[in-house]
Image (tube, rainbow, N blue to C red):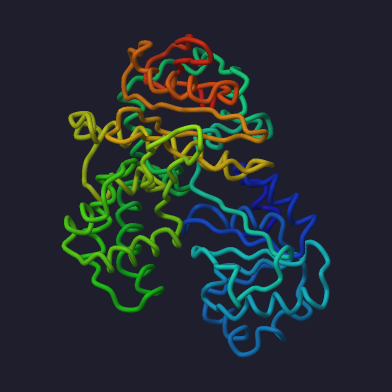
Amino acid sequence: MTNEALRDRYRPRLADEPLGELLAGVPAVLITGPRAAGKTTSARRLAAETVQLDRAGAAATFVADPDAALLGRAEPLLLDEWQAVPGVLGAVKRAIDIDPRPGRFILTGSVRADLRGESWSGTGRIVRLAMSVLTQREVNGGDLIRPGFLDRLATMDVASTHSNGQLTVIDYAALAMRGWFPEVVDATSERVRRAWLRSYLEQLVTKDVSELIGATDPVKMGAYFEAMALNTAGLAADATLYQAAGISSSTAARYDELLADLGIAVRVPAWATNRLQRLEKRAKRYLVDGGLVAAAAGFDVQGLLSDSDLLGRMIDTFVHTQLAPEATLAAHPVRLHHVRTAHGRQEVDLVAELPGGKVVGIEVKAASAVTRNDARHLAWLRDQLGVRFAAGVVLHTGPDTFELGDRLLAAPISTIWA
């Protein structure tokens, strides 16, 4: 497909504006994220020429002499799946050392590169941009430039979603486990959707991981992934996961790192501040796509609705999937955290520290009826932080938006993309 045809069929992404802005200001942009998240599709719109390095014919020249292979190419040059020929990073570095003009290279890959090592010493000349799976906001289309949910929450500008219809907990359960990879969103039937997700998961545990670390046991890797899936959005101890999978702690640590490098698993760190004491230090684990969780654990919507604990985890994961790209791609990126005190007396699902030091808190409830009691942990956080606390919201599966106290709201989950 030509770049012109691609533009005609393209679904705009939240990453489009920052990608264009970066490419106009730095010599190279490295786009990372899960396989099949749409990185190449987004990059090709801006590229003058594309080289797919995961194809043997295209890769041969770069394997033999990557520096010579870059000469005379149209720019911006897209080097797709760079990790298939790791030496290309060094060649790009040397090319930029000679000519540091903006907009020369775009690199895409399904493995997170460590730019602090010897593979790249030109700090400031190549900038990493993270993409994830689709969000409902992107699927809906419309204006992706307007302020996102976190910015609107900070100013208490969270509108009602009646115009979008009233989603039920069944609808949210289906959204949480549907899968948000572009090919899943565009699947022509439920059978196709499920088959695609199963195939993705199979390749993940048999091929993607083994290509990074050599031979591995796909059965054990699959068991570990299933344990992570059942504990998504949780603070499970490492031992809980590796014992469930029947593997050693060292193997589990290696799998954790690999899944993070592949963009499939995310750790949301515990928030640290001198205003709060005796906080849990463990990170909260999320898988980036609820469709993979459902594929690994083998449940459907009815099975999800019958398990209140898993439903809560899936809805929490779904909210994180919707908010993480917004936080990562903001002009001033926002890192998401969680807060939990000792023994879980107070717990806030997500906390975002915005530019200027303002803080917003988010609680996620898989329930349609919300009261002030559901906001008690947000109220505690507000009282501890004082003026730094901009707003808190309890996101729920009901239809209404209403106040729960000073700087506290209840709002439908769909408010995120309304």
Place of residue 224 in the rendered image (x, y in percent of width and height, measured from the top left)? 24, 58
Nearer the observer, 372 or 396? 372
Place of residue 43 in the rendered image (x, y in percent of width and height, measured from the top left)? 65, 57
For image coordinates 69% across by 83% down, the residue present is 69
Place of residue 96 in the rendered image (x, y in percent of width and height, measured from the top left)? 77, 73
Place of residue 178 in the rendered image (x, y in percent of width and height, measured from the top left)? 36, 39
Q: Quadrant of residue 74?
A: bottom right
Left or right of residue 227, residue 317 in this image: right
Nearer the observer, 392 or 225? 392
Left or right of residue 263, residue 94 in this image: right
**Residue at the bottom extreme, as displayed:** 64
Left or right of residue 119, residue 293 in this image: left
Nearer the observer, 344 or 324? 344
For image coordinates 55% across by 24% down, the residue present is 389
Q: Quadrant of the C terminus?
A: top right
For image coordinates 25% across by 68% down, the residue present is 218
Q: Is residue 224 above or below residue 123?
A: above
For image coordinates 57% across by 71% down, the residue present is 82
How many marks can you see? 0
Nearer the observer, 100 or 68? 100
Q: Quadrant of residue 252?
A: bottom left
Q: Is residue 132 above or below residue 152?
A: below
Q: Is residue 340 above or below residue 213?
A: above
Left or right of residue 292, residue 93 in this image: right
Q: Quadrant of the N terminus?
A: bottom right
